[in-house]
Amino acid sequence: MPGVTDRPRRRWALDLTPLRTSRDFRLVFFGGAVSGFGSFITYVTIPYQVAKLTDDPLMVGLIGVCELVPLLFMAFVGGALADFLDRRLLVRGGELALAALCGVLLINALSDRPHLWLLFVVAALTAAVDGLQRPALEAMLPRLVQPTELPATMTLRSLGMQIAQLGGPALAGILIATVDLAWVYAFDLATFAVSVACLTLVKAVPPPPAADRPSLRAVVTGLRYARSRPELLGTYLVDINAMFFGMPQALYPFLANQLGGPKVLGLLYAAPAVGSMLATLGSGWTNRVHRHGLMVLIAAALWGAGIIGVGLSNTLWLTLACLAFAGAADMVSGIFRMIIWSQTIPDHLRGRLAGIEMLSYTTGPLLGQLRSGLMARTRLGVGGSIWVGGVLCIAGTAALAAALPKFVRYNGEQGMAQKKAEDDAWAAAAGGRS
């Protein structure tokens, strides 16, 4: 009986509906996957180059600080612009700016004496451009698909990034070990041509009617809205806690030295993506879960457990397995956080809230790199810095669950109903003002 045996498979299978129904989403998905593939190569290469030039884990961790400072400001600017301008144009402009910065890295790598300071400057400028671009991209996606397709859309977007995160670091490890660093950056530069072409073919995504002009008042409006919604605060705080204590990427170059040298560096970066991809491919069950807040908390605690395993492991295969487990848990958390954001936030605030979301999922990892680098310089060493961070991640998640009972009880069906009511009210008010 094919119908009976296929039904359980469909419950777990990845939902591809948005790729079939939306031409614009297909373009964004493909262009983002190709561009992300190259970007993850550079994401691995810059810390490696800094580690090679300095042999200091703290210097690698300081890359995160350089990225954090401009991001704290530009994410708010990008969010306000995304609610006032054509979101597609903002995303495409960001890709062109990122390509130019990649060209600077290429030129620096070709010099006889690469400049350390230039790596930090490019990292900071890349974060600034990302702060302008990412809110527009996140705000654009819900406009490309039907509301009922949002869970599948967020999952597919994550899948594209996982493909990039899996293939990019693995290829980066091979390239770093076999060719000059200039060729590594050149590969990333070539991928931007594909993403810019795809974004050019996407139809315009104009701002909502009667959109708020970019201003400090508009930014404050977004902040006040985020503060008024416990389910949004929960997604921000849980992720910041998990990434601050449990993000050890600044230590990967030094962990690789203990486990086999530069040739395994790409595997360390790629292992979480393997777990993420497995979780994504079997994510059909997420469409039937409505206690989104509770799932975010459970997944964050499991992420911490995986990081503890990484810190305690002294063999490559076990380290990679723990990283893959942590990546799967992080993917589950990310799916439900994106569903909460997409199904609850009204469109006229989507850009500004996307800027706040960006800060929540980037400040934690960036500060986490500094935390792990500093702690690794103590008696704990590299392994101790990692497993202690995992323990603190679980403790912080438990504390947030106790402090945010409304987030624990949040139901997605109620969130969708509230979003529809807020969108209808805004449209009615905009019509009255026109």
Image: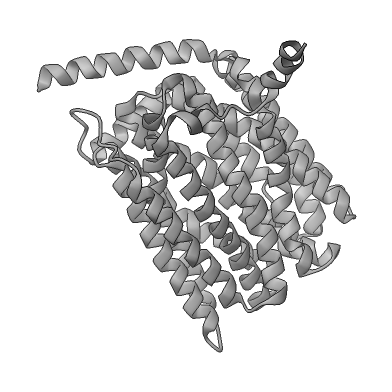
Q: Quadrant of residue 15?
A: top right
Near-viewer residue (277 or 193): 193
Residue farthest along the bottom direction in this orientation: 112
Residue 399 visible in the displayed image: no
Residue at image point 74% right, 38% down: 304
In the rendered view, would you say 378 is above or below 84? below
- Give x and y (percent) for residue 313: 87, 50
- Give x and y (percent) for residue 231: 51, 21
- Coloring scheme of the render? one colour
- Give x and y (percent) for residue 83: 28, 36
Residue at image point 70% right, 52% down: 270
Q: Quadrant of residue 145?
A: top left
- Give x and y (percent) for residue 364: 57, 45
Residue 323 visible in the displayed image: yes
Tell me if 240 is positioned left or right of 101 in this view. Answer: right
In the rendered view, would you say 314 is above or below 113? above
* Quadrant (top left/top right/bottom left/bottom right) for the C terminus: top left
Number of numbered discs: 0
* Quadrant (top left/top right/bottom left/bottom right) for the N terminus: top right
Residue at image point 61% right, 67% down: 45
Residue farthest along the left direction in this orientation: 434
Q: Quadrant of residue 101?
A: bottom left
Residue farthest along the right direction in this orientation: 315
Residue at image point 59% right, 15% down: 405
